[in-house]
Amino acid sequence: ATTAGRQVRVIEAGPRALGRVVSQAVSAVVRREHEARGVRFDFSEAVVAIHGSDGAVSAVELQSGERIPADLVLVSVGVVPNSELAAAAGLAVHNGIVVDHHLQTEDPMISAIGDCAAFPFASEDGRTVRLESVQNAVDQARCVAERITGKPAAYDQVPLFWSDQAGLRLQIAGLTRGDETAVMRGDPDGTAFSVFCYRDDRLVAVESVSRLPDHMQARKLLRAGISPTREQAADPGFELKSLLALAVAA
């Protein structure tokens, strides 16, 4: 929209950009690059009304009392898993349709995949999660297809997410929950760096901003359960793929 010469204002209930899904460092860079393109952010703010007439919007009213003139409003409020049918069928439902490591519900003849499926996350000792991403849905579909064609295996894929933001390519491998220690690889004041997220000494996720090689290596490291030391992760000159080579040799 800014490229088209429009004024853009983002009203965000949380305290920062993408606060639910990325680290402070990535959030700050995303905000900086959007603001450089003319986007204005209002954080920790709530919308109380959208005004208009004759089917057309005219303004957005904030909790502070301000009314923002608007020609177009995009509302992003999240999703609720579609689990009513499963509940009506007597299946377990808790923030989605509950499935096991093979993506089967309590009824082994019924499977659930994608955004509606709450499954045990193998990398966190079976903590139940529900992921809203294309890659997760595709990988889970493949897992179920292999099971029903005679090649059963537990679902243990590395979660993958991506987004294009203000000229940046954001790619995430793994899953965070907010209590990780962040290790920077590259220059966070620039537009190409990665954030390695550790829980204790175990690598659990990597957020890469316009650093595809880091992202590709992170996917492999997480899949293999290999954690570089924090010093190795922080050194842009250290070849992450060497750790994979050592694992293969062993």
Image: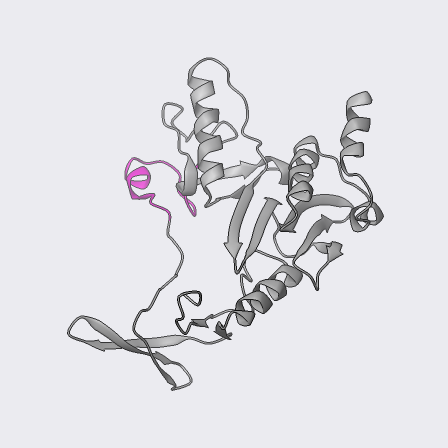
Q: Where is residue 19 in the image (x, y as percent from the top left)?
A: 56, 62
Q: Quadrant of the C terminus?
A: top right
Magenta-colored stretch includes residue 24: no
User: In the image, 109: left or right of 38?
Assistant: left
Given residues 106 and 199, the one toward you in this image is 199
Check the image and name the residue furthest to the bottom. 65
Q: Examine the rendering and report whether any part of residue 53 can be seen.
A: yes
Outermost residue on the right side: it is 231
Give, as a single range, the part of the protein colored magenta.
Answer: 81-98
Residue 203: quarter of image: top right
The relative height of residue 67 versus residue 197 in the rendered view (above or below) is below
Across the whole image, how many numbered discs are drawn on residues? 0
Answer above or below: position of 146 versus 15.
above
The main secondary structure of the magenta stretch is: loop
Q: Which residue lies furthest to the left in this view?
A: 54
Q: Where is residue 74 in the image (x, y as percent from the top left)?
A: 35, 64
x, y percent for residue 139 = 49, 31
In depth, the one of 235 and 75 nearer the eye is 235
Residue 8: x %, y % from top left: 42, 72
Q: Residue at image x 40%, y 33%?
A: 112
